[in-house]
Amino acid sequence: MPAPSHDGGISDVFPADVTDERQVAELVTAVTDRLGPIDVLVLNATGPQPEAPVPGVTWDDHIAQLNFFVKSPVLLGQAVLPEMQTRRFGRIVHVDSEVVHRPPPGRTAHVTAKAAQVGLTRS
């Protein structure tokens, strides 16, 4: 059951793997069934951010980061945009980090995925 907040709003918890298309669809259905139409989608999920020097970063490491930081916002956006467009209202807020502008050492795959995420948001 949703918990009321001090200012009259409500909140709840909806766990899901946001890189899994089926779970994203189920997540959006659960949220809308419980709370009504989604007006605002905040993309702020994060996952593991392995550190390794460039020679130790594999293509699979890059794919894992891209799957999380690019695939998840694509899936979530695709799941909420049609209803937002139908209602002619909605906002998507994409929380990013400073790593694209100031890459930390040893985070090649993470920085690459975050740069792709920025490109996705801007486009």
Image (tube, rainbow, N blue to C red):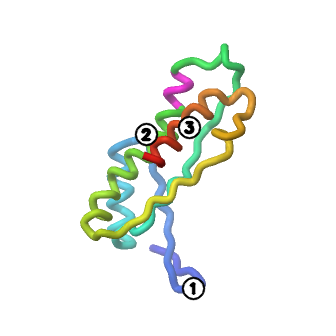
The residue drawn where x is 68% and y is 45% is: 98
Q: Which residue is mark 2?
A: 71
Q: Secondary structure at mark 2?
A: helix
Q: Secondary structure at mark 1?
A: loop
Q: Secondary structure at mark 3?
A: helix
**How many angstroms separate mark 1 from mark 3 (CA)?**
37 Å
Quarter the N terminus occupies: bottom left
Packing grade of label 2 (10 A; few <14, some 14-19, many >=20) is: many
Q: Is residue 17 visible?
A: no
- Which three-letter amino acid code belongs to the residue tagged 1? Asp
- Return the residue nearer the eye: 110 or 121: 121
Q: Which residue is mark 1?
A: 7
Q: Which residue is mark 3?
A: 115
- Magenta span: 60-64
Magenta part, dominant SS? helix
How far from the left and from the top, in percent, is residue 13? Answer: 50, 63
Q: Which residue is situated farthest in the left direction here? A: 86
How far from the left and from the top, in percent, is residue 34? Answer: 37, 70
In the rendered image, the vertical position of residue 27 relative to residue 47, given as above or below: below
Packing grade of label 1 (10 A; few <14, some 14-19, many >=20) is: few
How far from the left and from the top, in percent, is residue 79? Answer: 33, 53
Q: Quadrant of residue 38?
A: bottom left
Q: Earlier in the sequence, mark 2 or mark 1?
A: 1
Q: Earlier in the sequence, mark 1 or mark 3?
A: 1
The residue drawn where x is 58% and y is 41% is: 47
Whether residue 105 appears in magenta in the rendering, the answer is no
Q: Is residue 117 visible?
A: yes
Packing grade of label 3 (10 A; few <14, some 14-19, many >=20) is: many
The residue drawn where x is 52% and y is 54% is: 94
- Which three-letter amino acid code belongs to the residue tagged 3? Ala
**How many angstroms separate mark 2 from mark 3 (CA)?**
13 Å
